[in-house]
Image (cartoon, helix red, strand yellow):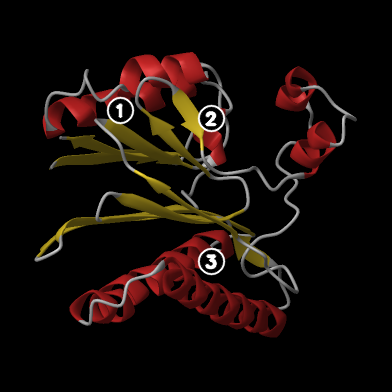
Amino acid sequence: MEVIVSYCTDAGNRKKTNQDSLSVKVVNSPKGKIVFAVVCDGMGGLAHGEMASREVVMAFVEWFEVEFARLVAQDMVSEDTVHDQWQEVIVRTNESLGEYANREGTMMGSTVSVLLLYQEEYYICHVGDSRIYRINEKTKQLTNDQTLVAWEVEMGKLTEEEAKVDPRRSVLLQCVGASEEVRPQYERGKITGNTTFVLSSDGFVHKITKEELQDMFSPERIQDKQHLTQICETAVDIVMERGELDNVTVVAIALKK
C-alpha cells in the first residue's frame, strides 16, 4: 500500500497565533505500514490555547510511540485495548490541563481528532468539533460535531443550513481540559480500495463544501506528495479567501492500493 501524506496549517486572517496543533507519522513495521495522525484545536487566552492543543497532541504521540509500539510487538492490538488506552490518555490529559488552568486562574482546553490506520482498518478517537472525513467514491464525515448547534440540529430545533450561520456554531459541549468528564466518540472501520482520510480543525470546514473536498482530495486525483501538498495549500487558500477568521488546519492521508 502506498501512503501519501501532507498538511497545511495557518493562523488565519485575524488571529496572531495558531492554536491548532498536529502530528502525522507513517511507520514501516512487520505488520505493514502504520499511519497515525492527530489534529487539535486549542482554546484559551494568550498562549493557553496553543499550549492545550500541543499538550494533547504530545500525549497521543507518546502513546503511539510507547504503548502502541508495545501492543504491535506483542501482537495484542484490539479495538477494546486501543480504545481503553486512548480513554486513559484523555482522562489523564484532561485532569492535568484542568489542574494547570486552575493554578493559573484561567480556562483552557482543546478538541482532539485521532486517526490510526493499522492492518486495513481505521480507528478514531474524537472530542469537540475538529473533523475526520473519509473520501473514496463519496465523501463521508466520520466524526460527529460535539457542539450546541449540532445537538440542536439532531433535536430538530435547527436546520443544517441554519446551523452553518448560527453565531453559536463553535460552542462546544465538551473538550479536553475544560470539561469535568470527557466522553470521546470512538469508531472503527474497514479500509477498502483507494481512500483519502482528511483531518481538519473547524476553521477549515466552515467555508468549504463536501463536493469541493471530494473534487480536491479524491484518491485517484492525488499523484504524489508534492501534488498533495499543493492541494492542501490551495484548499487552505480558498478557505482564507472566503473570509475564514479562525485558525485553519488540514491533514490529508492518501492510500493507494
Expressed as whole percent of the image width and height from the top left, the position of residue 52 reads: 53, 66
Badge 3 is on which residue? 52
Can you tell which quarter of the image residue 123 is in?
bottom left
Which residue is drawn at the image coordinates 58% and 32% (left, top)? 245
Residue 205, numbered label? 2
Kindly tell me whether residue 25 is visible in this rendering: no
Question: Would residue 134 be found to the left or right of residue 244 on screen?
Answer: left
> What amino acid is found at the position of numbered circle 2 in the picture?
Val
- Mark 3 or mark 1, which is nearer the start of the sequence? 3
Residue 233, numbered label? 1
Label 2, secondary structure: give it.
helix
> What amino acid is found at the position of numbered circle 3 in the picture?
Ala
Q: Quadrant of the N terminus?
A: top left
> What amino acid is found at the position of numbered circle 1 in the picture?
Glu
Label 1, secondary structure: give it.
helix
Q: Quadrant of the C terminus?
A: top left
Expressed as whole percent of the image width and height from the top left, the position of residue 181 reads: 73, 72
Which residue is drawn at the image coordinates 76% and 27% (left, top)? 163
Between marks 3 and 2, how big is the CA–CA gap? 21 Å
